[in-house]
Image (cartoon, grey):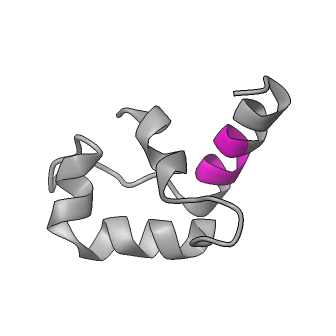
């Protein structure tokens, strides 16, 4: 799954990690944007949070 696409929706003042997780679980358009299929597991909010923290630490 292309995690690099997820932080686009999670920005300061934007959507929380929990909201992004809920969106991916309930919206087929969001799942397809991220390259997920119905049988795929959506990463939970903690995965999104850790990934965003790593990007921030790397200056990305």
Is residue 28 rendered magenta in the image? Answer: no
- Residue 49, image x and y in percent? 69, 52
- Quadrant of the drawing holding the C terminus: top right
Residue at 34% x, 65% y is 24
* Picture coordinates of residue 36, whole percent (x, y): 23, 46
Snapshot quadrant of residue 51: top right
Residue 33 in picture, x, y percent from top left: 23, 49
Asked whether, in this view, residue 55 is left or right of residue 15, the answer is right
> What range is drawn magenta here?
47-52
Q: Name the residue: 60% across, 50% down.
A: 48
- Single out the residue that lies furthest toward the top: 58
User: Magenta: predominant secondary structure element?
Assistant: helix
Tell me the quadrant of the picture where the N terminus can be found.
top left
41 relative position to 54: left or right: left
Comparing 36 with 9, the one in front is: 9
Q: Quadrant of residue 15?
A: bottom right
At 84% from the left edge and 30% from the top edge, which residue is drawn?
57
Q: Residue at x 29, y 45 (%)?
A: 34
Q: Residue furthest right?
A: 57
Q: Quadrant of residue 16?
A: bottom right
Please determine whether, in this image, residue 10 is positioned above or below residue 15: above
């Amino acid at each position: 799954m292309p995690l690099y696409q997820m932080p686009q929706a999670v920005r300061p003042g934007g959507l929380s990690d929990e909201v992004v997780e809920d969106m991916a679980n309930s919206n087929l358009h969001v799942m397809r944007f991220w390259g997920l299929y119905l049988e795929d597991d959506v990463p939970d909010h903690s995965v999104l949070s850790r990934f965003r923290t790593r990007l921030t630490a790397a200056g990305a």
